[in-house]
Image (cartoon, rainbow, N blue to C red):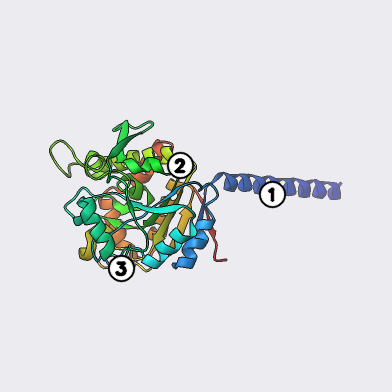
Amino acid sequence: MKKLLTLLLGLVVLTACHNAQKVQTNETKNKPVVYFTQDISPEGLVKIYDKISKNIEGKVAIKFHTGEPHGPNILPVPMVKALWEHIPNSRLVETNVFYDSPRQTTKGHRETLKINGWTFTEVDIMDEDGTVMLPIKGGKHFKEMSMGSHVLNYDSLVVLTHFKGHTMGGYGGSLKNIAIGMADGKIGKKMIHQKGDEQWGYTGARFQENMVESAKATVDHFGKKIVYINVLRRMSVDCDCAGTSAAEPKAHDIGILASTDLMAVDQASLDQVYALPEHEGHDLKERIESREGLRQISYMKELGMGTGEYTLVNIDK
């Protein structure tokens, strides 16, 4: 009898372990994957892109950030060039800016492209020939967002982002890259920033919500044919739009994160920043929280753009 009870108890334990493992496996499967590499190089960028490129086809736009003239923190030209060469039928894309900058006009923008070394291919300034309105499903502030009209010329979008701090957003990840970066310089960016007659009227949570809704227009437009890459290097508290006045980074370079899920890749990037030693991460965290930057994540969740959960896969192992 004692042996029988022992045997039955063993079967119960084995069944419980099997069920727990099954639940864990199913939970992992349901979470979006975020790939990670410490290899911040042309080879590392191409390798991690290949992990998320399954649905990228047709004419491909690579949304990057030009940076202000002589900006010290922009992504290295050889990395961007390698990705562009690796993706068939692809083109680098940008839009003009809203603030006072040479990049306010297409002519000045093209001069900045030359100064910063973006000369290996022609960059498409998407609002050069006007704008187009893309719908925003479920937005409470906007029903549509003004974008550079050339967005309609592409089948797929690769969002290549230098992850760093930001003066107004707190941080600039993949969301900011398409929220501000896809909106045209004269109308869309003004919609996101301006409150009444104030040019920079919206700040804090409302500004973050405006960005999320703008980004949703692009996400919905491309559907499954959009992927996100965040490069965590030279992470100043300031955006690349600060140019040579950007604060010197205190955080060490971490690596590259990539996913097919916008919310997951930005959440994973934030998690990496918040895991930094205090002396490295303090300024970045202070910048993020003082601007209510984490509202980007919580509002994405409210709009059904993700859960914030993810499975991190290190491709270096």
Q: CA distance from mark 3 to mark 1?
A: 45 Å
Mark carried by residue 306: 2
Q: Which quarter of the figure has residue 192? A: top left
Tell me the distance, in whole angstroms, between the alpha carbons under discs 2 and 3: 31 Å
SS at circle 2: loop
* 233 with respect to 226 (left or right): left
The residue depicted at 25 percent of the width and 65 percent of the height is 115
In the image, what residue type sits under mark 3?
Lys
Is residue 80 in sight in this rendering?
yes
Task: Name the residue: 45% across, 64% down.
Answer: 82
Q: Which residue is mark 1?
A: 17
Residue at left offset 38%, top offset 40%: 152
Question: Disc 1 marks which amino acid?
Answer: Cys
Q: For this rendering, which residue is in front, 40 or 266?
A: 40
Residue 163 percent across, percent down from the top left: 36, 58
| Residue type, numbered disc 2 | Gly
Disc 3: CA contacts within 10 A as few (<14), some (14-19) or many (>=20): some
Circle 1 packing at 10 Å, graded few (<14), some (14-19), many (20+), is few
User: Sequence order check: which comes first, mark 3 or mark 1?
Assistant: 1
- How dense is the environment of label 2, judged by Cα within 10 Å: few (below 14), some, or many (20 and up)? some
> Is there a contact, CB below 8 Å, between mark 2 and mark 3?
no
Task: Residue under label 3, please give it.
Answer: 250
- Looking at the image, residue 7 sits to the left or right of residue 234; the answer is right
For mark 1, give the secondary structure: helix
Q: Is residue 39 visible?
A: no
Q: Is residue 134 left or right of residue 257?
A: left
Report the mark closest to the observer, 3 or 1.
Answer: 3
Dot 3 falls on a residue whose secondary structure is: loop
Sequence-wise, which precedes: disc 1 or disc 2? 1
Marks 1 and 2 close (CB-CB < 8 Å) = no
Question: Disc 1 versus disc 2: distance between alpha carbons?
Answer: 30 Å
